[in-house]
């Protein structure tokens, strides 16, 4: 069991007052700043790592989403992953890529936000049609549900989330230079170069399935997963708990650690310090009236 602490609620500044994120789904840490996407918003939230000051919102897509839950669920972009992209000629200071799950046609888009030299977001987000990238994946996976994205060891990696009906979790890898060319508009969307299944175990008989991932410096990666009792990539279900795991650079699953707090962890970020993985996680309470949480945990590095 991995002990976690609640760091804060994810409150945000809005035009009217202080509100909150209610469906946090992707997390990236860059220096002393946290970037969070929620699956039912058109914005990215920016937080300082320290303190409890409300986050600031940065628009990703135009338009407003409906307030009523069913209508909002049907219309939302379902941004389930946030990737920190390293520098390349098209984005010389790196970028963030907010990625839709692909589970419905309206969920096959992404938003690219470039950094400038001081590490600030540069200008407006650029919308990207993910359907060319997702088409070969949908041909192989009837219930496509991308929940994590990161770059490691020259690969752009996507995490396909399973469910109770099909508890198959996959690491889908693309050649990173080919993804760069596609993002720059100089080449078509590439085909995946590999697809690797991982068995994450279960909690109370409900399979653990990917909810996010982040790269380790040596080519390995960490992930979070939730045991959600649903047989569908669209419908939510009761969550029996969450866990984090570590995968070595050679693809070995080094361990899976259930969280001490019963929650649905949907986003993960990581730094390495003092022989331990210092983890941050964000949650999705599946209740628009309840705020998402930022959690922390320290895991002895299983690669040592």
Image (cartoon, rainbow, N blue to C red):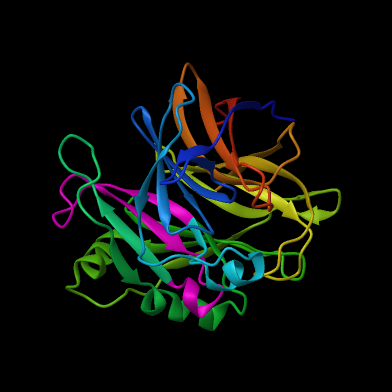
Q: Residue at x 44, y 65 (%)?
A: 64
- Residue 89: x %, y % from top left: 13, 54
Magenta-drawn segment? 81-108
Front residue of this view, candidates 200 and 286: 286
Q: Residue at x 47, y 60 (%)?
A: 158
Q: Is 133 situated left or right of 65 in this image?
A: left
Q: Which residue occupies the foreground of this view, 247 or 96? A: 96
Q: Residue at x 43, y 61 (%)?
A: 99
- Name, please, the residue furthest toward the right: 204
Between residues 123 and 29, which one lies in front from this camera angle?
123
Can residue 150 be seen here? The reply is no
Which corner quadrant of the image does residue 256 belong to? top right
Residue 20 location in percent, x, y?
Answer: 54, 42
Looking at this view, name the residue that lies furthest to the bottom. 139
Q: In the image shown, does 169 or 259 lie closer to the viewer?
A: 259
Above/below status of 140 relative to 184: below
Name which residue lies at 58% across and 73% down: 74
Give the residue at the far front of this rendering: 16
Q: Is residue 144 visible?
A: yes
In the visual, does 130 lie left or right of 113? right
Q: Position of residue 151 (x, y in %)?
A: 37, 51
Drawn side of residue 59 relative to residue 261, left or right: left
In this rendering, position of residue 240 left or right of residue 232: right
- Please say whether residue 98 is one of the residues in the magenta stretch: yes
**Quadrant of the image occupied by residue 238:** bottom right
Residue 183 position within the rendered picture, expressed as x and y whole percent measured from the top left: 25, 66
Q: Is residue 89 magenta?
A: yes
- Judge whether 33 appears above or below 210 on screen: above
């Amino acid at each position: 069991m991995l002990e976690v602490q609640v760091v804060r609620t994810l409150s945000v500044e809005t035009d009217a007052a202080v509100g909150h994120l209610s469906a946090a789904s992707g997390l990236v840490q860059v220096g002393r700043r946290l970037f969070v996407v929620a699956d039912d918003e058109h914005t990215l939230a920016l937080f300082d790592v320290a303190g409890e000051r409300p986050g600031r919102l940065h628009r990703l897509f135009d338009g407003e989403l409906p307030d009523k839950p069913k209508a909002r669920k049907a219309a939302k972009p379902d941004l389930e992953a946030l990737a920190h992209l390293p520098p390349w000629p098209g984005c010389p200071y790196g970028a963030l890529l907010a990625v839709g799950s692909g589970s419905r046609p309206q969920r096959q888009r992404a938003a690219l936000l470039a950094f400038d030299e001081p590490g600030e977001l540069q200008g407006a987000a650029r919308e990207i049609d993910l359907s060319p990238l997702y088409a070969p994946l949908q041909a192989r996976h009837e219930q496509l549900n991308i929940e994590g994205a990161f770059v490691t060891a020259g690969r752009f990696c996507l995490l396909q989330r399973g469910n109770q009906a099909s508890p198959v979790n996959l690491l889908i890898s693309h050649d990173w230079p080919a993804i760069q060319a596609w993002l720059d508009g100089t080449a078509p969307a590439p085909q995946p170069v590999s697809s690797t299944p991982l068995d994450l175990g279960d909690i109370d008989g409900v399979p653990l399935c990917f909810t996010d991932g982040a790269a380790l410096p040596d080519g390995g990666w960490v992930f979070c997963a939730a045991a959600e009792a649903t047989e569908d990539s669209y419908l939510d279900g009761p969550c029996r708990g969450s866990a984090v795991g570590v995968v070595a650079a050679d693809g070995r699953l080094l361990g899976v650690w259930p969280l001490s707090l019963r929650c649905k962890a949907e986003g993960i970020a990581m730094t390495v310090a003092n022989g331990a993985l210092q983890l941050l996680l964000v949650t999705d309470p599946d209740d628009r009236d309840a705020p998402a949480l930022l959690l922390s945990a320290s895991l002895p590095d299983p690669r040592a």
